[in-house]
Image (cartoon, rainbow, N blue to C red):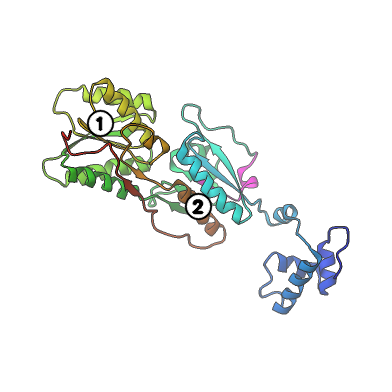
Amino acid sequence: MARSSTPPTSRDVAQAAGVSQAAVSLVLGDKWRGRVAEATAERVRRAAEELGYRPNLAARNLRLGRTRTVLLVVPALTTEFFAGVYTGAARVAAEHGFGVVLYPSPEGIGPAKNPFASARAALDGVIASSMAADALTAIRGDQLPLVMLDSDPDGSLGAATVNLDIADGVRQVADHLLDLGHRRFLHLAADVASWTFDVRARELTARVGAVPGTSVRTVRAPLSIEDARAATEAALGAPGPRPTALVCDDDKLAAGAYKGLRRLGLRVPDDLSVTGLDDLALATAIDPELTTVRLDAELFGERGMHALLAVLEGRTPQGGDIPVELVVRGSTAPPGAP
């Protein structure tokens, strides 16, 4: 069948296959089952292929009420972790003909202006971090098909939740430090109202508290290196026995703790062992390199996008938390080790 110089239309496909344009729409829109005979559907597909027909996706999406666009709501674009989440989500989206739009809500700035006159008209669904819940509410994204990341599965706004196994990561940190002989712990906690940070505090207290003769003291700091430095100096300058292990909610807090310890004349890990959580590039840029928990941000984004596609298609998303891994480096040692 020769191809003409002008792009073929659905009418051309219908004529070549000997069917109506409605039948072509049903077959190429994958809605033919039970309405068009299988032999007819095969004839339509063969005619479309021979003619080189490509459907007008923009017009088709308008008819179906679908834009094949997903919104990813994150706290900020400047963090290495959420850049990885975006990369993973965008990779899976592209494989399924979707695009991903980022909607950041940087701390101290507030949610960006809603980029859509109506989110419901512009989007098929939303993937959102629980750390950006305020921004999600501001654009009424919770009224769309929604997948939540780092969110309490028992109280999530979303149709599905995707979580890293943060609880297990904290247990791995605690067990590592306890096995080294540490009994006095300082927890440098992120001063952020988020389920994921609540899990870290709860699991650390429970795991360490199960061992007799242990103690955990908690101080809070915003997620910045300078705030973490100041909080570390204040906590270790207080009277009482000095902790031997400093457990930080993320690697950025750990980097700030390093600065605070140096100002106090304390050495890592000789005077205090320090751990982080994330395994950012920062973890191997500081000296000694940081013992931390590796989180696969790209896999996290991939799973989030797969879950949203399942929700959109009426399927049950894959269950189970994403495993995490403790990476032991030079920042931890037995108490008082040279």
Q: Is residue 300 left or right of residue 52?
A: left
Relative to 238, residue 163 above or below: below
Residue at horizontal 50%, vertical 40%? Answer: 83
- Residue ID for mark 2: 302
Q: Which residues are magenta?
A: 117-127
The stretch drawn in magenta includes residue 209 = no
Residue at horizontal 35%, vertical 25%? Answer: 227
Quadrant where the C terminus sits is: top left
Q: Nearer the viewer, residue 227 or 260?
A: 260
Q: Residue furthest left?
A: 213
Q: Amino acid at mark 1?
A: Val
- Residue ID for mark 1: 268
Residue at horizontal 32%, vertical 25%? Answer: 259
Residue 234 locus on image (x, y percent):
25, 22
Residue 190 locus on image (x, y percent):
34, 34
Quadrant in which residue 208 is drawn: top left
| Mark 1 or mark 2: whose residue is earlier in sequence | 1
Give the SS element for disc 1: loop
- The Cα–Cα distance between marks 1 and 2, rounded to whole angstroms, is 36 Å
Q: Amino acid at mark 2?
A: Glu
Quadrant where the N terminus sits is: bottom right
